[in-house]
Amino acid sequence: MLAVCSLFTLVACNDYETYGEKKDKERKAIRNFLADSSFVVINEDVFHDNGDMTDVSKREFVYLNNSGVYMQIVHKGCGTPLQDGENSDLLVRFVEMCLLDTTVFYNDVNPYDVDVMNVKRQGNTFTASFTSGAWAQSMYGETVPEGLLVPLSYLNMGRPRSATDHIAKVRLIVPHTRGHIMASRYVYPYYYEISFQRKTDL
């Protein structure tokens, strides 16, 4: 009986992952995703020297030290940036993929299936909540993860008015510390493709 109890205890201990082990697994998943996708990581100095842009043709992602987020700016967007003190509704389309179990969540198939995100800017700080759409109705709730707000400092928000205009679009790798409730709970990193546009420009 003692031997059986000891065996169960050993199995239970082996199944338990510490927070440190989960973080190691997260870092490995991010490294593998970057390598498998042939993405090239640049630092913030190079990013700023390039006018706060990444070269999509070179598959560049910038690593942002303060947040731990990896970002690729596909289109900087047309129009103007969100201004200090501004409160604005943005239309958001996204694809979200967990890098540890490849679960995918998205709203970018139907052109009318769009989330609305209310954003307020105070200095360099952005706060936001989803007011409608798939995200707001999901298990994540209305709170916008910090990682999804990181690109807003670098993007313009507007409506395309010519053939050469594009709405803002980014790709992100968001660690659990800047992710939603599920990312934080399970120490999961997520990959995103997101576009932003001012609702008032429609």
Image (tube, rainbow, N blue to C red):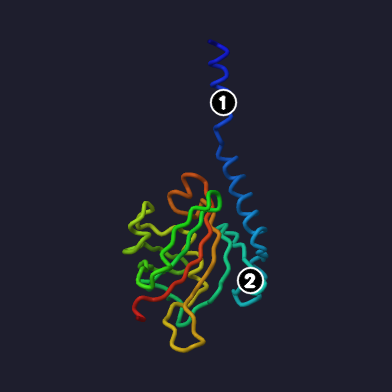
Q: Secondary structure at mark 1?
A: helix
Residue beneath disc 1:
11
Picture quarter with the C terminus: bottom left
Q: Quadrant of residue 175?
A: bottom right
The x, y position of residue 73, in whole percent, is: 56, 71
In the displayed structure, does residue 200 sit left or right of residue 182? left
Q: Quadrant of residue 16?
A: top right
Q: Please name the residue shown 56% across and 73% down the image.
A: 74
Q: Residues within 10 Å of mark 2 (few under 14, many from 20)?
A: some
Q: Can see residue 128?
A: yes
Vertical order, 34 against 81 (above or below): above
| Amino acid type, label 2 | Phe
Q: Point out which mark residue 47 bears.
A: 2
Q: Secondary structure at mark 2?
A: helix
| Amino acid type, label 1 | Val
In the displayed structure, does residue 154 sit left or right of residue 107? right
Q: Quadrant of residue 35?
A: bottom right
Q: Exactly how many numbered labels are in the figure?
A: 2
Q: CA distance from mark 1 to mark 2?
A: 48 Å
The x, y position of residue 8, in whole percent, is: 54, 21
